[in-house]
Amino acid sequence: MTAMTPPTRTQPDLSYLLDHTSHVLRTRMAAALAEIGLTARMHCVLVHALEGERTQSELAGIGDMDKTTMVVTVDALEKAGLAERRPSSTDRRARIIAVTEKGARTAERSQRIVDSVHGQALDALPDGDRETFLRLLDHLAGGHLSTPSPAPARRARQHSG
Amino acid sequence: MTAMTPPTRTQPDLSYLLDHTSHVLRTRMAAALAEIGLTARMHCVLVHALEGERTQSELAGIGDMDKTTMVVTVDALEKAGLAERRPSSTDRRARIIAVTEKGARTAERSQRIVDSVHGQALDALPDGDRETFLRLLDHLAGGHLSTPSPAPARRARQHSG
DNA sequence: TATTGTTATACTCTATAACTATA
DNA sequence: TATAGTTATAGAGTATAACAATA
């Protein structure tokens, strides 16, 4: 037990690099958007709801959120006066998310904030390397690292009563 | 409200690319390590404890974990027979994390698993672009995106009694 | 029977607070 | 007084289950 023989790493620590950069960027983004009272999810819903008539479940699919998470997000947007639930004219179960004028102005601002945070992050890269990096990261995101692999599957919940 | 004018994006969606790739890689890593009964944290502690005599708080600093998270992680390592708490010879408050022989063998295996998952992920990139990508990602991690920015600061907890 | 959206709540993860024993 | 480690538990985020209305 006195012998210390740590295993040798044969590959660079891609996990650390990706986790660290995405965590820092996410934190910065959250702080920047919080200045105008938005979360990243609210921004996401706002932008995609502006693209056309979308129901909650459609927007949930686009933003890769659970439908219950979408309820909370839309609640927040309504409370802030940025969007409204409207009945769908074709499906009485569904709600169309309509963005208010205030919401549209906010979406313009939040998109500028998002672009600014991204731009500042990419500024760290040498001129001319930015496109290369984005191309390769995009390649990674669309290639082997595109599928979330077998679902982690949460354990079925316990009944309380 | 009938006018749909979504804001124009002027920067690529770096957030999505980083979040997506890191999430998928993290999920794959967790699944791969789970096959030998480890979490990423357990692997991390195991490897760094093998490098020399380290206390829990030192290992917590290296792995960027809270000391309470470290307690849980070391509990799991002890329960699995991979490491043991030993009194420090110089500070009676501190515990040295000693890796067992089984733990050392497990660390070899887990490091091979980690390298394999990283290698498979990087295989998606064209030959010759891997080093470029890693260099740029490393640059990003060490540059503007190195500091976690002003701490998000959690609200002080409420007292129950 | 399946689906949209809602509510309620259980689960996981993590951090805060308080404590003991040292320093 | 400050620090290492422990315990207990609050807080945040999210997903599961059950339900009502509708398809």
Image (cartoon, coloured by chain):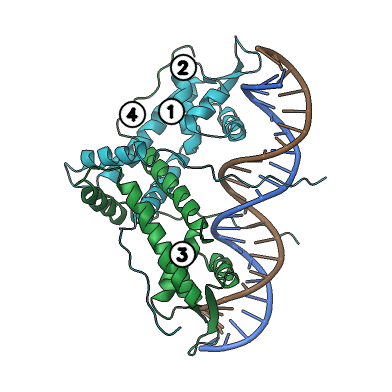
Chain colours: A cyan, B green, C blue, D brown
Q: Are marks 1 and 3 in contact (CB under 8 Å)?
A: no
Separation of disc 4 and disc 2 at Cα? 17 Å
The residue tagged 3 is B43
Quick one: SS at disc 3? helix
B38 over B94 or under it: above or below: above
The residue tagged 4 is B9
Marks 1 and 4 belong to one chain: no
Which amino acid, mark 3?
Answer: His
Q: Are marks 2 and 3 in contact (CB under 8 Å)?
A: no
A77 over A13 or under it: above or below: above
Separation of disc 1 and disc 4 at Cα? 11 Å
Marks 1 and 3 belong to one chain: no
Which amino acid, mark 1?
Answer: Ala
Q: Nearer the viewer, mark 1 or mark 3?
A: 3
Residue B19 appears at what percent x and percent y?
Answer: 41, 43
The residue tagged 2 is A52
Quick one: SS at disc 4? loop
Which residue is depicted at the point 43% across and 38% down?
A147
Q: Are marks 4 and 3 in contact (CB under 8 Å)?
A: no
Crowding around mark 4 (Cα neighbors within 10 Å: few <14, some 14 to 19, many 20+) is few
